[in-house]
Image (cartoon, rainbow, N blue to C red):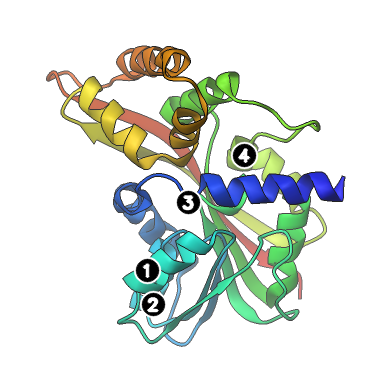
Amino acid sequence: MSAEYDRLKDGMRWMWSLGDYSRVAEVLEPYAEALAEFCGIRPRTTVLDVAAGNGNFALAAARRGAIVTATDLTPRMIDLGRARTAHVSEIEWAEADAEQLRIADATYDVVASVFGAQFAPRPQLVAAEMFRVAKPGGLVAMANYSPGGFLGGMGALLASFSAHPAFELPSPFQWGDEEEVRHRFEGLAKSIDFDQRKLYFKGDSVEGFLAFWEETNAPQSALRTMMPPHDYQQVRAAATSLFAELNESTDGRLKLSSPYLLVRARKLS
């Protein structure tokens, strides 16, 4: 099983290297700010950003005076993040797996992840690692996509066209369910606070947003790379139908929403 997970992680590194992530990160930046506010980060707070992407949360924390270590599984994300935050002396970068951080116990005041660690295949390992490296009484915080909405629908759509590993994986959207988070944090947290919110994607049209999504979304880019062009047209048609079905705009443009969950847990002292 260990070898199978190693192959899965190699595939994840490859997939998350695809697409123009910086453009979708711009859309998601306000939600990293929301988690930083939810955590109440103050100057000199030590922060670990797990599965940091190109640094949205790391920057939000640094703007509040924190001293930040940003980590990601994917070398390309590390490169993007280092380039983006080169002017910020309070941010350091390191390659790390959310399931095996290789960081000393009880190191950080705040350990956080924004739409990142939820995609690791073994959630109990993620929870254990995030709490392990947090100081006693420190915070473990997450912003996680919840089931439903545009992203939940798109996740199910892409999964229906994807090859699956030989072992069952939990849905990353389970991290957006309060009861599931309580279960995963049982015995690790002395208190947990939640705030369910919505995030939005907007575009000029269904067709224009599909082009943006294909250019920026790593799972969609992976399917487009792997599938024969004729077969991939089925994915495009299904995505177009989903966008049209979920469109909340009334002015001929596109507005898609998805629920997400802010999580703030206090580690046992």
Q: Is residue 58 above or below residue 68?
A: above
Q: Nearer the viewer, mark 2 or mark 3?
A: 3
Residue 205 at x, y percent in the picture: 19, 23
| Residue 265 picture quarter | bottom right
> Looking at the image, is mark 3 or mark 4 earlier in the sequence?
3
> Rounded to the nearest whole Å, what is the CA distance between mark 1 and mark 2?
6 Å
Residue 169 at x, y percent in the picture: 73, 35
> Rounded to the nearest whole Å, what is the CA distance between mark 2 and mark 4?
27 Å
Residue type for callout 1: Ala
Give me the residue at 70% from left, 74% from top.
Answer: 133
> Rounded to the nearest whole Å, what is the CA distance between mark 3 and mark 4?
19 Å
> Looking at the image, is mark 3 or mark 1 earlier in the sequence?
3
Give me the residue at 50% from left, 82% from top.
Answer: 45
Q: Nearer the viewer, mark 4 or mark 1?
A: 4
Q: Is residue 121 above or below residue 45?
A: above
Q: Badge 4 is on which residue? A: 172
Marking on residue 62: 2
> Looking at the image, is mark 2 or mark 3 earlier in the sequence?
3
Q: Badge 3 is on which residue? A: 17
